[in-house]
């Protein structure tokens, strides 16, 4: 009887061993997942541009001369810093300078003739007064008085005509100087010469209306920069001038620049084969280090619509559809329904359903990651 019990016990142990081996062989392998801890911190509701924006200069002028001509002087080169009014390019203008000299000398001659005519007029006036005094004493005739007064009036008119001619001559000098100025290309503001299209001796022509041609000089003021970016028409109504924003650039990875919305376009852009967008402009905050920024850099603008400073939050990538998350408890994932608040691409505010310190998975794209799945943490990432 004792031997029979031993045999039965051995059979039971063997069966249990086989069942254990089979269970281990058929049970699913744990899935390796990344976990994040629910914590408290800043959560913002933001809107970002749909396509890359562009860093723009507040002042940029693609300059061309108002008249065509041969380049006679290029006193600046690309990269030079220039002041407002500084000469950038000069066309051949020897003929116009000669016209100015001629006009100036004609003006001098006209002034001299005016002085002469007015001096004669003054003598005639005094003679008329002298004849009138003699008439009162009976020492001259009425005819002599009339003749003297008429001559004085005529001389006065000649004086005024000569002065008018002198003014016309002075105006001709200004016209000639304006003609010369058309051959001079000057900086309309202080800035940096970005590009020069032309060499000494070459001919340049002004751009015809409606036809885009390379500018003779491209002048950029890098001291003031902003970003222009397109926002989807659905998001645009929530944006107002003055809202805070952040600017990021591909040229400076990991760096963001504080900014604010300075303008929202009053119309919707409708480009073929593209979503309808509204252009916004974001100005960099005062004191931002913009020394290495260049107009033309691609940039992204994130407009901050609302902000919570001490919100319970989870990474947005941890959320499933219908506001669900997968909570990690002792090697098993458990689905939990949550109620959310503010959200952006990085964090989502949790209003109900989770507590600080709980760990959730963000590996939602891994095969087998679902409610009840056995998992092994890959890492404990810090938000």
Image: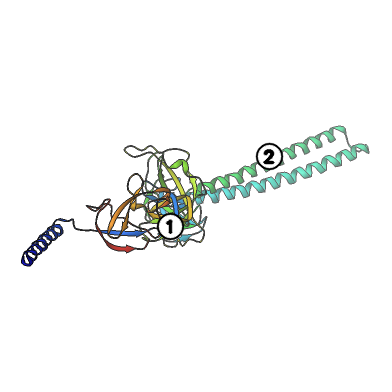
In the rendered image, the residue lying farthest to the front is: 1
Q: Which of marks 1 and 2 is in front?
A: 1
Q: Position of residue 121 (x, y in %)?
A: 75, 42
Give the residue at mark 1.
Answer: 193
Question: Which residue: 29% across, 63% down?
Answer: 379
Give the residue at mark 2.
Answer: 161
Q: Where is residue 303 in the image (x, y as percent from the top left)?
A: 45, 50
- Sequence-wise, the earlier of marks 1 and 2 is 2
* Mark 2 element type: helix
* Horizontal side of residue 49 vs 83, given as left or right: left
Q: Where is residue 274 in the image (x, y as percent from the top left)?
A: 33, 39
Q: Quadrant of the C terminus?
A: bottom left
Question: Which residue: 80% across, 41% down?
Answer: 125
Q: Where is residue 191 in the image (x, y as percent from the top left)?
A: 47, 57
Q: How far apart are marks 1 and 2 (CA)?
A: 50 Å
* Horizontal side of residue 198 vs 183, given as left or right: left
* Horizontal side of residue 172 vs 246, given as left or right: right
Residue 93 seen anywhere in this rendered image of the structure: no
């Amino acid at each position: 009887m004792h031997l029979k019990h031993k045999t039965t016990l051995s059979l039971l142990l063997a069966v249990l061993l086989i069942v254990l081996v089979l269970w281990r062989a058929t049970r699913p392998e744990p899935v390796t997942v990344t976990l994040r801890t629910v914590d408290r911190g800043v959560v913002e509701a933001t809107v970002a541009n749909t396509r890359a924006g562009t860093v723009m200069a507040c002042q940029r002028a693609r300059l061309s001369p108002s008249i065509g001509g041969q380049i006679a002087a290029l006193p600046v080169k690309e990269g030079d810093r220039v002041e407002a009014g500084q000469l950038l390019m000069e066309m051949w203008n020897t003929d116009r300078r000669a016209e100015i000299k001629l006009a100036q000398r004609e003006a001098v001659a006209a002034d001299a003739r005016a002085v002469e005519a007015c001096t004669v007029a003054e003598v005639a006036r005094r003679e008329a007064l002298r004849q009138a005094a003699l008439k009162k004493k009976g020492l001259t005739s009425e005819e002599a008085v009339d003749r003297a007064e008429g001559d004085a009036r005529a001389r006065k008119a000649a004086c005024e005509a000569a002065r008018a001619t002198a003014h016309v001559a002075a105006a001709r000098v200004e016209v000639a100087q304006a003609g010369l100025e058309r051959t001079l290309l000057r900086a309309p503001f202080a800035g940096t010469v970005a590009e020069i299209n032309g060499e000494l001796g070459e001919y340049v022509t002004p751009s015809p209306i409606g036809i885009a041609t390379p500018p003779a000089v491209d002048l950029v003021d890098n001291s003031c920069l902003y970003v222009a970016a397109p926002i989807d028409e659905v998001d645009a109504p929530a944006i107002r001038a003055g809202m805070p924003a952040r600017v990021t650039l591909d040229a400076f990875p990991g760096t963001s620049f504080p900014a604010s919305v300075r303008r929202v376009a009053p119309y919707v852009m409708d480009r073929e084969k593209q979503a309808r967008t509204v252009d916004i402009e974001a100005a960099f905050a005062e004191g931002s280090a913009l020394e290495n920024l260049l107009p033309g850099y691609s940039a992204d603008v994130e407009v901050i619509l609302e902000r919570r400073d001490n919100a319970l939050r989870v990474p947005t990538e941890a959320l499933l559809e219908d506001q669900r998350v997968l909570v990690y408890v002792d090697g098993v994932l458990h689905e939990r329904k949550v109620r959310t608040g503010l959200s952006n691409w990085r964090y989502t505010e949790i209003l109900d359903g989770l507590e600080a310190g709980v760990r959730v998975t963000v590996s939602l794209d891994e095969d087998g990651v679902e409610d009840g799945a056995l998992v092994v943490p890959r890492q404990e990432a810090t938000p």
